[in-house]
Image (cartoon, rainbow, N blue to C red):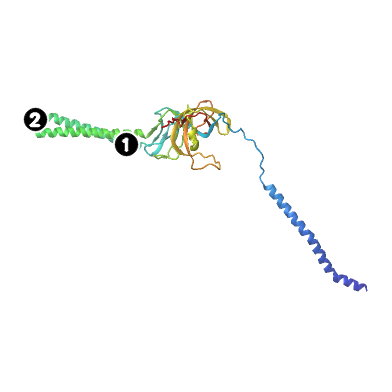
């Protein structure tokens, strides 16, 4: 009897184990899934960037005028930024200035290799000496011919030929001197001089480099007069009619509204050009054209650098003039 019970229990044990394992799986699988989902949500939340509220270092600039034309200006020198180049291409052998150097009109900036030109100059000088000797000989022969012709020793035709030879020698001397002056001019052109009084803003030429001619994307030397700074203001074309000649304006340094300065009107550049300085605003069109207005910075103590951007506000409260010209009714 006891043996039969044991046999029955042994035979029914696998069924009981399977049922128990199935019951356990029903609880374990959802628990594991929920744990994985919870871990995934936590990981995603932790990986998200945190945006903390920050205050700007300075408040945005504001206009003090009732009616304002807002624009962006670029600081430039009073002579405009001059891109200095060379008329003759060659290897740079001497540089006489540094970045920030003050120069006067006519001061040397840099020079090109002049060995070939100096050799040609020596040849031209020798040619001038030869032409001078040839002219002296021709003039002597002409003077001698006059005496011989008076004494009826030399024919009139031969005397005229000597005169023509003297004229030819004189012309050859003039030609040799002109070639000498041309070579001397080329030698002088190998040294580039400052066109105006100013300061060297950029120096992009180095010893041993080849300096090409023509308009370059990066000028060899950039200079201008920084004693008085100007602001080139880009006024969008739909606002151009509101800007008047002599209108007051105020400018603030981009990123630091506390640095302000009044501006004095200088001139209009009446040719409207495509806008080059874009602010990145999504509503800004890349085909916008602008009227450029030149203003002078009144506060000379303001720490500004050429090429710096400024936020400009122009007083548009006056009426009667449009772009500096009075309108008349016909």
Check disc 1 and report the residue beneath it.
Answer: 119
The quarter holding residue 35 reads: bottom right
Q: Position of residue 213 (x, y in %)?
A: 39, 39
Q: Position of residue 221 (x, y in %)?
A: 44, 35
Specify whether residue 205 is in view: no
Position of residue 38 relative to residue 55, above or below, is: below
Q: Disc 1 vs disc 2: which is toward the camera?
A: 2
Position of residue 294 relative to residue 10, above or below, is: above
Q: Position of residue 288 (x, y in %)?
A: 49, 41
Front in this rendered view, residue 15 or 178: 15
First along the sequence among labels 1 and 2: 1
Front in this rendered view, residue 73 or 163: 73
Which corner quadrant holds the N terminus? bottom right
Circle 2 packing at 10 Å, graded few (<14), some (14-19), many (20+), is some
User: Helix, strand, or loop for circle 1?
Assistant: helix
Which corner quadrant holds the C terminus? top left
- 62 sits to left or right of 246: right
Circle 1 packing at 10 Å, graded few (<14), some (14-19), many (20+), is few
Q: Which mark is residue 149?
A: 2
- 64 sits to left or right of 195: right
Q: Across the whole image, how many numbered discs are drawn on residues?
A: 2
The quarter holding residue 90 reads: top left
The quarter holding residue 163 reads: top left
Q: Residue at x 90, y 72 (%)?
A: 5
């Amino acid at each position: 009897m006891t043996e039969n019970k044991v046999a029955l229990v042994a035979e029914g044990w696998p069924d009981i184990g399977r049922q128990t394992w199935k019951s356990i799986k029903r609880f374990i699988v959802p628990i594991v899934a929920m744990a994985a989902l919870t871990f995934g949500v936590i990981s995603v939340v932790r990986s998200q960037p945190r945006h903390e509220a920050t205050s700007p270092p300075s408040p945005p600039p504001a206009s003090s005028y009732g009616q304002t034309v807002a624009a962006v200006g670029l600081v430039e020198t009073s002579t405009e930024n001059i891109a200095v180049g060379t008329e003759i291409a060659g290897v740079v052998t001497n540089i006489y200035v540094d970045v920030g150097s003050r120069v006067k009109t006519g001061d040397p900036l840099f020079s090109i290799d002049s060995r070939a030109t100096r050799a040609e100059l020596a040849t031209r000088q020798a040619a001038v000496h030869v032409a001078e000797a040839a002219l002296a000989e021709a003039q002597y022969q002409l003077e001698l011919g006059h005496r011989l012709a008076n004494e009826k020793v030399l024919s009139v035709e031969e005397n005229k030929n000597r005169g023509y030879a003297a004229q030819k020698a004189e012309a050859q001397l003039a030609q040799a001197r002109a070639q000498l002056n041309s070579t001397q001019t080329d030698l002088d052109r190998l040294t580039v001089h400052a066109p105006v009084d100013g300061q060297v803003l950029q120096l992009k030429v180095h010893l041993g480099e080849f300096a090409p001619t023509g308009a370059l994307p990066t000028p060899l030397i950039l200079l201008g007069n920084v004693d008085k700074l100007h602001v080139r203001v880009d006024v969008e074309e739909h606002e151009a009619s509101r800007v008047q000649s002599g209108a007051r304006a105020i400018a603030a340094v981009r990123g630091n509204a506390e640095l302000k300065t009044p501006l004095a009107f200088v001139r209009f550049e009446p040719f409207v050009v495509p806008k080059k300085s874009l602010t990145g605003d999504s509503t800004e069109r890349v085909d916008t054209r602008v009227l450029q207005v030149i203003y002078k910075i009144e506060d000379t103590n303001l720490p500004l650098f050429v090429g710096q951007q400024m936020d400009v506000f122009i007083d548009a409260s006056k009426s009667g003039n449009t772009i500096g010209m009075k309108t008349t009714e016909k």
